[in-house]
Image (cartoon, grey):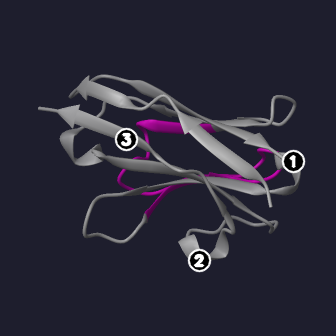
Amino acid sequence: QVQLVESGGGLVQAGGSLRLSCAASGRAISVYVMAWFRQVPGNEREFVAAITRSGGTIYYADSVKGRFIISRDNAKNTVYLQMNSLKPEDTAVYYCAAGPTIGIMTSAGKYDSWGQGTQVTVSS
């Protein structure tokens, strides 16, 4: 498995932006579909965005489409999530995940490597 470490979370006002990073080690992320999920206490982990191994296909949850951008730099073994026009309902712990498949997956159970999460809080 690959080890993942998220960073870049924090407190931001509504309408602001944050950029999350997910640094991988132990294995090249080029063999993984990479994704971001988020979770609030008491809720299931929610799919946010995913990107295929080469970056050729990207998929977003409807709730973030047009505001968030997922990208990857396989040379740096890092995945990013640019979050713009943030809303209070985006407040959650954000997790990076790696899945050993080819196509996009939106189910958390399909990913077998996870980071520890980074807190994003959006104030109104």
Residue 52 is one of the magenta-drawn residues:
yes
- Which amino acid, mark 3? Gln
- Check disc 1 and report its element: helix, strand or loop: helix
What's the CA distance linking mark 2 and mark 1? 20 Å
What is the x, y in percent for residue 27?
87, 49
What is the x, y in percent for residue 33?
74, 57
Q: Quadrant of residue 59?
A: bottom right
In the picture provided, is 59 more to the left or to the right than 85?
A: right
Q: Quadrant of residue 22?
A: top right
List the residue tagged with mark 2. 109
Name the front one of labels 3 and 1: 3
In the picture provided, is 87 more to the left or to the right than 101?
A: left
Span shown in magenta: 46-70
- Check disc 2 and report its element: helix, strand or loop: helix
Q: Which mark is residue 117?
A: none
What is the x, y in percent for residue 26?
85, 47
List the residue tagged with mark 1. 30
Q: Is residue 88 visible?
A: yes
- Which amino acid, mark 2? Gly
What is the x, y in percent for residue 73?
78, 32
For the residue pair 70 and 30, the one nearer the viewer reads as: 30
Q: Are marks 2 and 1 in contact (CB under 8 Å)?
A: no
- Which amino acid, mark 1? Ser
Q: Residues within 10 Å of mark 1 (few under 14, many from 20)?
A: some
List the residue tagged with mark 3. 119
Which residue is found at the position 28% from the left and 27% from the top? 11
